[in-house]
Amino acid sequence: MNRNDPGNAIAEAAKAFSNWGRWGEGDVLGTLNFLDAAKRREGAALVREGVSFSLAQSFDMAGPQQGWRRRTNPVHTMLETGTDAALGNQGFPHGFGGADDMIAMPLQCSTQWDGLGHIFDHGKAWNGRPAEEVVTSAGDLVTGIEHMAPHVAGRGVLLDVGRVVGGPDAELPDGFAITEEHLVATADAHRVTVGRGDIVIVRTGQLTRARREGWGEYAGGASPGLSFTTAGWLHRTEIAAVATDTWGFEVRPNEFENAFQPLHQVAIPNMGLLIGEMWDPDALAAHCSRDGVYEFWLTAAPLPVTGAVGSPVNPIAVK
Amino acid sequence: MNRNDPGNAIAEAAKAFSNWGRWGEGDVLGTLNFLDAAKRREGAALVREGVSFSLAQSFDMAGPQQGWRRRTNPVHTMLETGTDAALGNQGFPHGFGGADDMIAMPLQCSTQWDGLGHIFDHGKAWNGRPAEEVVTSAGDLVTGIEHMAPHVAGRGVLLDVGRVVGGPDAELPDGFAITEEHLVATADAHRVTVGRGDIVIVRTGQLTRARREGWGEYAGGASPGLSFTTAGWLHRTEIAAVATDTWGFEVRPNEFENAFQPLHQVAIPNMGLLIGEMWDPDALAAHCSRDGVYEFWLTAAPLPVTGAVGSPVNPIAVK
Amino acid sequence: MNRNDPGNAIAEAAKAFSNWGRWGEGDVLGTLNFLDAAKRREGAALVREGVSFSLAQSFDMAGPQQGWRRRTNPVHTMLETGTDAALGNQGFPHGFGGADDMIAMPLQCSTQWDGLGHIFDHGKAWNGRPAEEVVTSAGDLVTGIEHMAPHVAGRGVLLDVGRVVGGPDAELPDGFAITEEHLVATADAHRVTVGRGDIVIVRTGQLTRARREGWGEYAGGASPGLSFTTAGWLHRTEIAAVATDTWGFEVRPNEFENAFQPLHQVAIPNMGLLIGEMWDPDALAAHCSRDGVYEFWLTAAPLPVTGAVGSPVNPIAVK
Amino acid sequence: MNRNDPGNAIAEAAKAFSNWGRWGEGDVLGTLNFLDAAKRREGAALVREGVSFSLAQSFDMAGPQQGWRRRTNPVHTMLETGTDAALGNQGFPHGFGGADDMIAMPLQCSTQWDGLGHIFDHGKAWNGRPAEEVVTSAGDLVTGIEHMAPHVAGRGVLLDVGRVVGGPDAELPDGFAITEEHLVATADAHRVTVGRGDIVIVRTGQLTRARREGWGEYAGGASPGLSFTTAGWLHRTEIAAVATDTWGFEVRPNEFENAFQPLHQVAIPNMGLLIGEMWDPDALAAHCSRDGVYEFWLTAAPLPVTGAVGSPVNPIAVK
């Protein structure tokens, strides 16, 4: 990787790790195609104790967003309340009262999946389609997140790189680039394998730190994350999806002098990889470190918002 | 049940089927307490084929809402698009382009869970708490849906009443009240049991009809649904949750002359029952009718919107 | 006008009535340039009685929108309420209480100005600029409505065509195309002149009818409005702006077999004309019909939403 | 004023300066009643040059909000764009293209009027009404801002206290409490009178400073503003409305050790005074300092959002 030539580095990786055409011209699922029925049976067999974990951050104004590219934290408002009900303001008979609410939020505001229409490479969306024909103001007309609605359930693997590679606090410092060597060493330490169809969660510990110290002016600031050089590993392992506990999945600042999220540019439009961001693996990670088991059943179902290029999600791991 | 005296009928059922105090004064989960680790192990063991189904409607402007109590369909808008990326309007280097989006929606607009703070009975919320102290303009301060985030994963049972009790089209007519007898007969026909900790999905077929004929001016109009008289069955079976494919869960118009959602008034604040609405069980139901197996592993994880009285959800069934 | 050849009719009118370059290459105001200080002095001198009128419809769920192109009615929600304040839920000292609220609305949902970036002709925006460089997902980067913020105050003229040309109910039927002859006859009947820099309000009476009979499934349905043939009059009179009491300004259905808002296509991107829609002139019109004076001081200040292609507005007429 | 006894100070001022009942039990306008036809004629006569000024800040993400009480800056999004039009993605015939947009914003986010339902005193809203009956989750059922829609047009007076009392930069320091003496001295320096029915704009210069130095983490932080002790002047002068160029109208931090916006508590629910915040008087102030004329015609029309407790506004001054 030539740090001074991001354009060529991205182009080479994009070509080397492209999955265009692999699942036919009409494909709308990308690497989710790797997650098949056999993998689901394998995943379900991992439920031994019956304990379940949410891997979602809370959706509220305490989130990390600061307004960059109009990404705000979710705004939750009430349409009807218990105070109104108690005061008899609602007009229902026989003591009936109700509360309703609504939300306005960027779909990229908190724990999320990046859809296949989220990133483009030189005007091309996933599978080589012209970006301008895929995602218009009317949404993603081809690869909208709704196509993934029934599929994201299978075997999950946690790679707690923060715990294995980080210090005693189990956190990686901001700017730390996780390489293939770190991923492999972590899997080895966990005695877990990673392969075709798996949903891999990489814990850096940055969220743990943010929860302790506050987000500050974070969103998009420095954080640990995957190195651009992991593109080959992401491709070769044939995993179905990968998620981190950080805003941006890949290391921030990015490893090139002048680039923006170069691993996204390779992974989403070229590889067709489903990427999760801002997940909260901490409760699960604590359990895994206790029992030494880093594989589990995972359901991470996006809301089927028609034409969305991403979705908030509450991933549920069951061991 | 005296159809002319809804006030007393509701009060009697509320008293008879109350679970107040059953799980302690501080409880925030209601009947979800019935869903334990053993039930999750039982549910996971039902994954035999590895096939998965989304039970969510699509979230878009084609939904059933008409503005009643300010409930609109979800409004999805783009913050960045592929057309901008293709035209080089975004200012990123090296051919990087991106699309972002946002949503504004009532949390009760489509496939959803009703949280415990959604309905009150004579100013009382779940577990006997004063409604005005539980749900203010700041949201549900006590029983917000975020408390349920890790829990809703277990054994699901489909009761396809439309198929068993309805005509050859497998649909119940609008206004049809599903009684305990119908539920029991359906379970018998399916050779499936319903018990403590299960998540029960009742299919009426009304969504099938709406999909074919359009919603018209539906939201809140006539539909099949559970009879008020099923309150005892809902309580006695100790199920963790129940969902239907209709807007309002219970039969519409309601069975009393002058009442509004009386079964909600008993089930949510008094029984602490988790209720799902506007689910789409049709793809799952078709599979169940083919293989004759009406039980499965079900994950239906609400988005943990802090203080929400409900949540959109993409329930995933795996068989 | 050849009703069977809308393409050529639009192209001819666009060429004949173009104001491209009239106010320089950098112009962002279009016909608002006609509204100068002298015109403001003339307008202010029309305040004789001191009575003021709002020409805005109410902004609420009772509006005409039905979801076409995701245009909904405004959704107003409370962030804090008096019920909370009364119950002491807010945490302020010394008896202080407060209510806050928010709104989510398309800028085209109710009484509005169409900005210069609202309509394009063959990919060209106002003054001949490429549409794709003017209005991106980031908004109107060149002619955003904020540029008009200080300017829209001057002499207003009401042409109550409904009263002069319509029946005893002072309403024009749906589908009625108002021609130049109707406009001139109305001005004559009102003994009022229309000229350079004026803001002209054309009343059809359709809103009066909708208020009486309900909107039904209106938005975009049949209504009276300006004929395509008035383009020359709109250009020749050098008015600064024109507004109607209808959803679409021009007659609906449009006068060509296969066209969509052809007068918009001529007037906004080619003529640079500021167009108002869904105004409510009824209270003002009643006063004008009583005192026979159809000119007045008019302020119709758009909200300076940066980059907006339109704006809700509460126009105030003072006589 | 006893700084250590805010409760009594507020109660005494509330009683001394109450206008409850002054305009009848059904009143919904408060001090706007002072703005009559004669005042509008007087105001219109002030248009001498014909030059107009917008007193609104721009509505965008660069505003001062930081999320306090869920107040965000306005979020403006596009529903249709010129890039889509240029690429032929819209489906209209004959080269027609269009752009639409929407906004989500707290009504208190930027240049605004506080409605009469915005603040309560010990559970009482304007005119002594119970807060819980006036402002519910359905909005302000009695004194919604829509009632003010036609009225806010009359004589405006600028009191540029920053210029008269501040240093050479014409700015008051944060925490500076403007007293009656400052207001009177400023009016004297401007050779302008303030009286019944006027709309008074007090410029502190804080916005000038924020524009130069950025908002930082402002919203609600320290700023100049009116002293609690001006309540008597506000009442005695019988002005119709008053606005400042600051977030909070009154001096921040407030003058009592433990209080929150005590002048609001007196002025809105007790006096019925219309208060404007976050106005931008700078362009107008520069003109006034040049020609020495500090009075003008002012239109500041709230959007008639039904039931709103406030409204964004683009005030237009014409001299």
Image (cartoon, coloured by chain):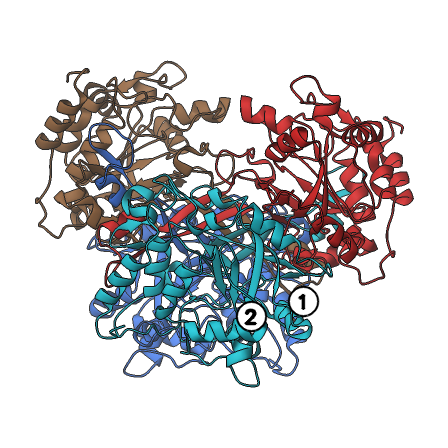
Chain colours: A blue, B brown, C red, D cyan
Residue C215 visible to an observer of this rendering: no
Whether residue C11 is visible here, answered yes or no, is yes
Is residue A244 or residue B31 the one in the foreground? B31
Cα separation, mark 2 vs mark 1, equals 11 Å
Q: Residue at x 42, y 80 (%)?
A: A174
Where is residue A20, by image quadrant? Answer: bottom right
Q: Amino acid at mark 2?
A: Gln
Q: Residues within 10 Å of mark 1 (few under 14, many from 20)?
A: many
Q: Callout 2: 10 Å neighbours few (<14), some, many (20+)? A: many
Residue at image coords 16%, 35%: B195
| x and y percentages locating residue D112 in the rendered image | 50, 57
Q: Quadrant of the N terminus of chain A?
A: bottom right
Q: Secondary structure at mark 2?
A: loop
Q: Amino acid at mark 1?
A: Gly
Picture coordinates of residue B14, whole percent (x, y): 13, 31
Q: Give the labeled residue for mark 2.
A: A261
Q: Residue at x 63, y 42 (%)?
A: C49
**Chain at tag 2:** A
Residue found at the far bottom of this picture: D168
Badge 2 and badge 1 both on one subunit: no
Which sits in the foreground, D79 or D64? D64
Dot 1 falls on which chain?
A: B
Image location of residue A120, percent across then percent down: 62, 60
Numbered circle sitting on residue A173: none
Label pair 2/1, CB-CB below 8 angstroms: no
Q: Which residue is mark 1?
A: B95
